[in-house]
């Protein structure tokens, strides 16, 4: 701490008996000086040149990205994946559809590559995902649909799937998204009775799958992962449903350790970082860790007149970030929410490059959701996260060691 800041701080403490407006002015002056101090000399140069993972380590927060095989094999993408992040989540490569394309025949290539890459670059892995209605193998869904797989067999197959996959990577996965996206989007929300797994095996399955995963790797943190469960829907409807569900699992002594809030934001809807902070704190109050697991902030991008193809594409690589300054603010809001909650252990973006993004393929006319533009230049979204992490070093519960192992 600089001498001048110590002096002001002491003045601020001494002003405790002074009128409220004087105390306020002293506190504001202290804050301004602190920020000025942080932005001066070495700290400013550190922030301008430090990677997200380095800055995250200084506030005991791991910064992650989802990665697909191209992110590990393309030299430029791989360099960013290794340099900027300290956690990797496979975008698709650990999903059942990929790892068991036909019954009893496994394909671990993509998942193995990702875990090996992560270890080589001192990154941890968020395993994603074991129980989800989407990206299931055709043989499984067709077998259930045509009655050749009974519900009892389905339950055994799921147990086997979880045991096989979690055991394979035992000791190498930091957090597992055991269950993904099981709440309805309605208000009020609830565990979705029409979810593929609930419909066939009942809500009691939730407790079982966490227990099966825990048996296969007792050291992995086991998470419930979903979107809009930290107030992004404004109503808190999905938060209420998720909170009730995880609380009930804890009451049954189910080994659940964390809640992952995906953080897929869209500028056409609202976002309230105060509500997100409150909700993350509420999960933490149950003794759970929390994480932002799939952050991105999409918006409508300029489109061609003819076919509405988003301009953010590989064929027309016009960076459009100038159209989306609010994107940086919303990224910062999510990061600040996480930083404000001690139990928030990682902040992961769902891919870092607009050219690789899942958004244009899913939300017609939208894009510009990521930290790097289509030419792989860092956008204001990136710089804003960098600055926020740099300034967070003063937060009391985020101080301390700069070792990523913490
Ligand atoms: O691999 C095939 C390829 O062979 C084929 O030519 C091509 C044609 O469309 O499809 C390829 O598969 C695609 C797969 O991603 C791999 O790229 C699927 O069509 C596509 O539907 C699939 O999308 C994934 C999506 O989950 C599926 O719901 C996205 O990549 C993936 O980023 C996304 O991730 C989800 C999280 O798991 C859960 N939360 C939401 C998030 C975004 O939807």
Image (cartoon, rainbow, N blue to C red):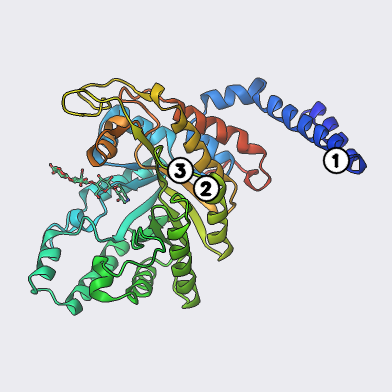
- Sequence order check: which comes first, mark 1 or mark 3? 1
Residue 159 visible to an observer of this rendering? no
Image point (29%, 25%), residue name: 302
Please tell me how many numbered marks the rendered image carries: 3
Mark 2 secondary-structure assignment: loop
Q: Is residue 307 above or below residue 339?
A: above
Give how far across and how far down residue 323 sits, in percent: 39, 24
Count residues near mark 3 (Cα–Cα under 10 Å), then give few for <14, some for 14-19, many for 20+: few
The residue that disc 2 covers is 405
Q: Identify the residue shown where x is 14% and y is 77%.
A: 150
In screen coordinates, is 280 left or right of 162? right
Asked whether disc 3 touches disc 2, contact meaning CB atoms under 8 Å apart, the reply is: no
Observer-nearest residue: 406 or 274?
274
Q: Residues within 10 Å of mark 1 (few under 14, many from 20)?
A: few
Between 377 and 101, the residue placed more toward the observer is 377
Whichever of callouts 3 and 2 sits on the residue coming sooner in the sequence is 3
Which residue is depicted at the point 26% across and 75% down? 201
- Depth order, front residue of 369/214: 369
- Left/right placement of residue 292 relative to residue 199 reads right
In the rendered structure, find residue 270 and report the number of the disc placed on it: 3
For label 1, the residue is 20
Q: Nearer the viewer, residue 291 or 330?
A: 330
Residue 20 image point, x, y percent: 85, 40
Point out the image quarter for the N terminus. Answer: top right
Residue located 51% across and 37% down the image: 332
């Amino acid at each position: 701490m600089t001498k001048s800041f110590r002096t002001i701080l002491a003045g601020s403490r001494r002003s405790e008996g002074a009128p409220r407006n004087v105390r306020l002015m002293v506190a504001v002056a202290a804050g301004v000086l602190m920020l000025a101090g942080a932005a001066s000399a070495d700290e400013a140069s550190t922030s301008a040149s430090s990677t997200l993972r380095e800055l995250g380590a200084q506030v005991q927060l791991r910064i992650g990205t989802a990665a697909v095989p191209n992110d590990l094999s393309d030299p430029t993408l791989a360099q960013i994946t290794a340099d900027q992040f300290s956690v990797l989540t496979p975008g698709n490569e650990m999903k059942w559809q990929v790892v068991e394309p036909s019954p009893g025949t496994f394909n671990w290539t993509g998942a193995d590559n990702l875990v090996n890459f992560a270890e080589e670059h001192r990154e941890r892995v968020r395993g994603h995902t074991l129980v989800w209605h989407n990206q299931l193998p055709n043989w499984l869904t067709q077998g259930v649909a045509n009655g050749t797989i009974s519900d009892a067999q389905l339950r055994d197959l799921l147990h086997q799937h979880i045991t096989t996959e979690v055991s394979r990577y035992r000791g190498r996965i930091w957090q597992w998204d055991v269950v993904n996206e099981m709440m309805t989007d309605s208000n009020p929300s609830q565990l979705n009775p029409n979810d593929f797994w609930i419909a066939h095996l009942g809500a009691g399955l939730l407790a079982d799958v966490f227990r099966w995963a825990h048996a296969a790797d007792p050291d992995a943190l086991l998470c419930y992962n979903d979107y809009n469960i930290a107030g992004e829907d404004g109503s808190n409807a999905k938060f209420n449903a998720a909170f009730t569900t995880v609380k009930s699992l804890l009451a049954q002594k189910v080994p659940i350790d964390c809640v992952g809030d995906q953080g897929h934001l869209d500028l056409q809807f609202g976002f309230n970082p105060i509500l997100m902070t409150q909700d993350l704190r509420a999960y933490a109050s149950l003794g759970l860790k929390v994480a932002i697991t799939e952050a991105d902030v999409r918006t409508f991008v300029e489109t061609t007149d003819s076919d509405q193809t988003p301009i953010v594409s590989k064929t027309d690589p016009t960076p459009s970030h100038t159209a989306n300054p609010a994107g940086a603010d919303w990224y910062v809001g999510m990061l600040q929410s996480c930083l404000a909650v001690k139990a928030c252990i990682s902040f992961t973006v769902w891919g870092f490059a607009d050219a690789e993004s899942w958004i244009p393929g899913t939300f017609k006319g939208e894009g510009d959701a990521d930290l790097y533009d289509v030419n792989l230049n860092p956008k204001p979204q990136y710089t804003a996260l960098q600055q926020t992490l740099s300034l967070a070093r003063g937060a009391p519960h985020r101080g301390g060691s700069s070792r990523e192992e913490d």
